[in-house]
Amino acid sequence: QQQQQQHLSQRQPQKVVLRPSGPARMAVFASSRDHCLNDLIDKCRGGDLPVQISYVVSNYLRTEENSHVYRALSRLNVPYHYVQCGKGRLREEWEANIRSIIQQKDGTVAAETTVSAPPPPPSARDNSNNNQTDFIVLARFMQILSPEFLSWYAPRPIINIHHGLLPSFKGSNPYRQAFDAGVKLIGATAHFVTDELDEGPIIEQRATCVSHRDSVRDVRIKSETLEANALHDAVRYVAENRVARVGGRTIVFT
């Protein structure tokens, strides 16, 4: 009976509620591909998404001279933080850099410290601080966050866009996987991030048809449009408090 009650409790919808009023605030993590980041910037700037971008973290060095995305963020007064990943750096090192950025923006530690204290729960945060984040969006951030980082950031959610139609083609290079499999339908999946790679509850998916005439490049171009659309819809649903998690699934309220 105890096991049955535990099972039932796991099946109860757990609604993701960010804040009772006002626009949600998100941090965006990105790598070199900027189509999802650029789309989020455009949607937020135009008022199409009820979200504020507090800051951007990237392992790709963008500057005023080489990136229109960087210039767009500058015009919106959105800070851009470059964090070097790979190239001999351990994940623990660059995750510590990211934790420090989050702590500084949340106001949980002084700027010169790097203590990895967990972020405060939503009820304890000061909503007057415009830089505090309600969630993180991985807009094609091509690094894997550790379970320790996910636990540290919890209970706030992290949303990822996977450039494939999950549960098929998990892991790296799903464009090539789909092409090699000769599929007739490709897609993109926005989901919550969990300890298991590409296994988190799905929030939104988009799909389109391909044929034998499409090259790997064609598949990538079509997929990138799907990725941007699926991601900004997922961000909208979460920002509007319309998503409930039920075990490994989600319910999106219309």
Image (cartoon, rainbow, N blue to C red):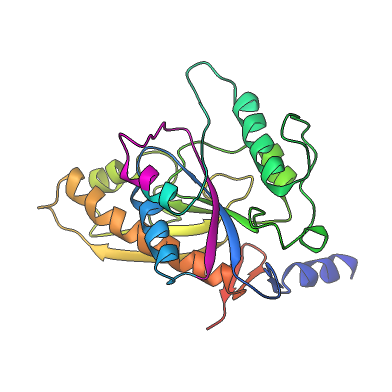
Q: Is residue 200 visible?
A: no
Front residue (pair 75, 105): 75
Front residue (pair 36, 57): 57
For the point 85% across and 65% down, the residue is 3
| Magenta-drawn stretch contains 69 | yes
x, y percentage for residue 17? 69, 70
Q: Residue furthest bottom?
A: 254
| Magenta-drawn stretch contains 102 | no
Residue 8 relative to residue 78: left or right: right
x, y percentage for residue 168? 41, 53
Q: Is residue 65 visible?
A: yes
For the point 37% across and 50% down, the residue is 72
33 to 127, vertically: above or below: above
x, y percentage for residue 52? 54, 61
x, y percentage for residue 249? 59, 66
Q: Residue furthest right?
A: 2
For the point 41% across and 57% down, the residue is 41
Q: Which residues are magenta?
A: 50-71
37 to 42, vertically: above or below: above
Q: Residue furthest left?
A: 213
For the point 42% across and 38% down, the residue is 31
